[in-house]
Amino acid sequence: MNEFKRFHPIVNFFYFASVIGFSMFFMHPVCLLISLLSGIAYTLMLRGPSALCGIKIYLPLMLVTAAANPVFNHKGVTILAYLPSGNPLTLESIAYGIAAAAMLASVLCWFSCFNKIMTSDKLIYLFGRTVPSLSLVLSMVLRFVPRFNAQLKNVRNSQKCIGRDISDGSLIDRVRNGIKILSIMLIWSFESSIDTADSMKSRGFGLQGRTAYSPYRFDRRDGITLTFILIFSTFVLNAAAGSGAMYFTYFPSMQGGEPSLYQTAVFIAYLLLCITPIIIEIREAYRWKKSKSAI
C-alpha cells in the first residue's frame, strides 16, 4: 500500500513540509497526540511489520527525554516532591517532558515516511533547476545510507566466510577485523563517489541549457489533493497564528485556550491533514478490492 507515493512530487513535498513543520512547533497535547498516532499508523502502513523495530527504538528515546526534563527543568508551580539535590519535582516539568518526547517521536516517524515517499528522483525534479547542487547532495545522502548498509552487509558476509568477521576470534582479532571492514567500506565509499562524479559530468550536469527527463505529470487528482492540503494547512496555521485555539503553555502552570467549536474544527482539520495519505491508501485498497470482486 503505497498509493500516495504515486502522486506528484509537489503534492508529497507540501504535505510533508506541513506535517513535519506543525509537528515540530505545535505543543498542544491534542496536536501532539494526533501527530504521533497518525505518524505511527502511516509508518506501519508504509513499512509493514518491519516498522515495529524502529518504533521500539523510539520508546526508550521517549522515556529518556521524558525523564531527563524534570531532572534539569524545575519550573512550575505544582511541586510534587523534592529531589535528593534539593530541587523541586514539578508536575509541569513532567508534562513538558512527556510532550517533548511525543514531539520527538512524531517527527522521527514523519521523517521515516518522508524518506520512503520522497525519493532522490523527486528531490532532483523539485530542486534540480533552482538549486541543482543542493538537490544533488540531498539525493546522494538519501541514497547513500541504504547503499552503505547493503554493501556493509555484503562485506561482512564475505569476511565471515573466511573467518574474519567482528564476531570471530579474540578481542584483538575482532578489533583488527573491524578495522579491516571499516577500511574496505571507506575505499568503497571513495570509489563510489568518484564514479558518481564522473557519471554526472558525462551526463552534462551543471551545463547551461541542459534538459532533464521527467516522468511526473500533474493531473486532476494531484490538483484536488494539493488543494485540500493547502486549505487544511492554511486553516490550521491561521488558527495557530491569529487566535488562541492552538494556545497551550506548560509554565508556570499548564493553561490552554478555552474549548470552543472553532477549536474543535481546528483539531479536526489538523487530523484530516495528518491522515490524508492514510485515507488515500484505504480508498485505493477499497477500490482494488472492489475491482477484484467484479472480475
Image (tube, grey):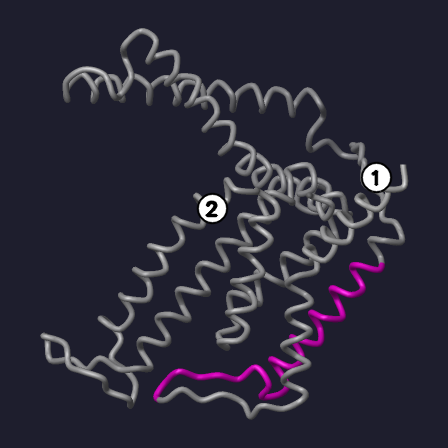
What residue is at 25 percent from the left and 21 percent from the top?
Answer: 167
Quadrant of the rendered structure where residue 225 is? bottom right
Residue 242 falls left or right of residue 64? right
Q: Which residue is mark 1?
A: 292
The C terminus: image quadrant? top right
Residues shaded magenta: 224-252
Residue 221 falls left or right of residue 39? right
> What is the secondary structure assignment of the residue under circle 1?
helix
Chief secondary structure of the magenta portion: helix
**Label 1 neighbourhood size at 10 Å, few (<14), some (14-19), many (20+)?**
few
What residue is at 61 percent from the left and 37 percent from the top?
Answer: 136
Seen from the viewer's position, the closer of residues 186 and 94 is 94
In the rendered image of this protein, does residue 68 appear above or below residue 286? below
**Residue 138 appears at what percent x and percent y?**
57, 41
What residue is at 51 percent from the left and 70 percent from the top?
Answer: 32
Cα–Cα gap, marks 2 and 1: 30 Å
Residue 236 falls left or right of residue 137? right
Q: Which mark is residue 52?
A: 2
Seen from the viewer's position, the closer of residues 191 and 133 is 191
Indicate yes or no whether the magenta region holds residue 59. Answer: no
**Residue 183 appears at what percent x and percent y?**
33, 19
Quadrant of the rendered structure where residue 129 is? top right
In the rendered image of this protein, does residue 230 appear above or below residue 235? above
The N terminus: image quadrant? top right
Q: Which amino acid, mark 1?
A: Lys
Seen from the viewer's position, the closer of residues 52 and 231 is 52
